[in-house]
Image (tube, rainbow, N blue to C red):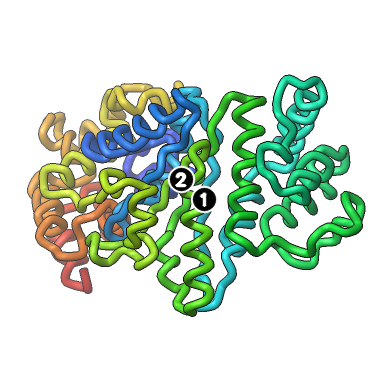
Amino acid sequence: MEKSIEKWFFMRPGFNTFRLEPDKHRQFMFSHRDRELRDALLGSIEESCFSREGHKAAVYGDYGRGKTHQCHNIVYEIKRRDLPLIPIYIKCPAWKTKEPFHSLFKEMVSGHRSDDLRRVATEYEKLAQAGVVAKLQDVIEFEDIAEVMSKGLTVPNLDEVKKAMRWLGGEPKVNMVTVKPALQPELTDSREFGAVLRGIAHMYAAVDKRVLLYLIDESERFQNITNTDAYFSWLASLRELTEILGVALVFQIGAKTRDELPTIFMQEEIIRRIGISNYLELNNPGPVELKDFVDELLKTMIKKGEVPEVHRHAMTPAALDATIPPDLQSIVDGDVEKLDAYPFEPDALESFVHDLSAGGYANKPSEVLIRLQKYAHRAMRHDSQLITERIVQEVNAEGF
């Protein structure tokens, strides 16, 4: 047999590894507990849309707990459920101590597709000319910003639209002479950033009846901003953005406990705007949750019968085939308990879950996937189509 992991372990079409990539596998959310946590957050986001408001939340948890995957899965679920939201995913880079706030804000603006933003701005301008909606200047009260939105975002040339988006994002030295010769060189003030976001949100609400949702991942990097002037500029800007009712913001923060959150998220003025009850801790799973995660993962990835019902919507017709390959039946001797544990032997699976839940840093989904992949590779090297107790202990002894 060719030694590819998908053939060796009878994986379903669409899977060729036991690892999960947040973007590629965004349609899957494994374990009942993690889906409950996601649905609680997504439910709050959806509920806020009924009044065209935007939910604010800060989700924090251990590194590798699955926050990035949750972000991508929420984007997938919004589209699958056709919720009235425009999701924008942003991954924070490694900012420097004196980083200006526009380093984040330009990512928020550029997260929109230029052609889509042009469509919305053009349609809004038509409605404003017809007197159906208010003119942008009356909404945001900044003349230069209103002009760039009404003129710079509506031109046929997408390169010009992208240029306008860069200026709206706070990028300096953007030549906007075609919109207005005397335009201010760049946006730097927290109120200006708030005006831009308020204007974009207002246009989407009026034209598409949808609320903007920014999922800001790796927000623990806000802690990098330690220069006093830069920090207070970020604080003022964050306060301004969280004040906007028509925008949803979800900050995903790597922090083991609430005490480890970046200082800026513990400021009273930010807590008040996000809401104490909207600081959500993504706890590491215990033994029962880990076993649930592993069982569900393996039943979805491997041809062991029916795909768990909760994941059938994400599978291709070929992947939904419930037929168990004869060779796999032979490996497990037709034993139901052995089939449930496959590719582990039952005792090896029990040891695997026990070791994970006992380790101070191991009881999280990312570690499950790293170890599972390592065990699978070792089994293949030993020409074994079962992950045995010996393989688990052998690999663990090497450093896990």
Q: 165 or 344: which is nearer to us?
A: 165
Closest to the observer, 377 or 140 = 140
| As drawn, 102 above or below 6 | below
Q: Residue at x 28, y 35 (%)?
A: 35
Residue 111: x and y in percent read 62, 48
Residue depicted at x 66% and y 43%: 140
Residue shown at 26% from the left, 44% from the top: 277
Front-most of residues 311 and 178: 178
Report which quarter residue 307 is drawn in: top left
- Mark 1 lies on a secondary structure that is helix
Give me the disc on residue 202: none
**Residue under label 2:** 249
**Residue 380 seen from this side:** no
Q: Is residue 390 left or right of residue 13?
A: left
Marks 2,1: beta carbons within 8 A:
yes
Q: Residues within 10 Å of mark 1 (few under 14, many from 20)?
A: many
Q: In the structure shown, which secondary structural element does the residue marked by tag 2 occupy?
A: strand
Where does label 1 land, which residue? 241
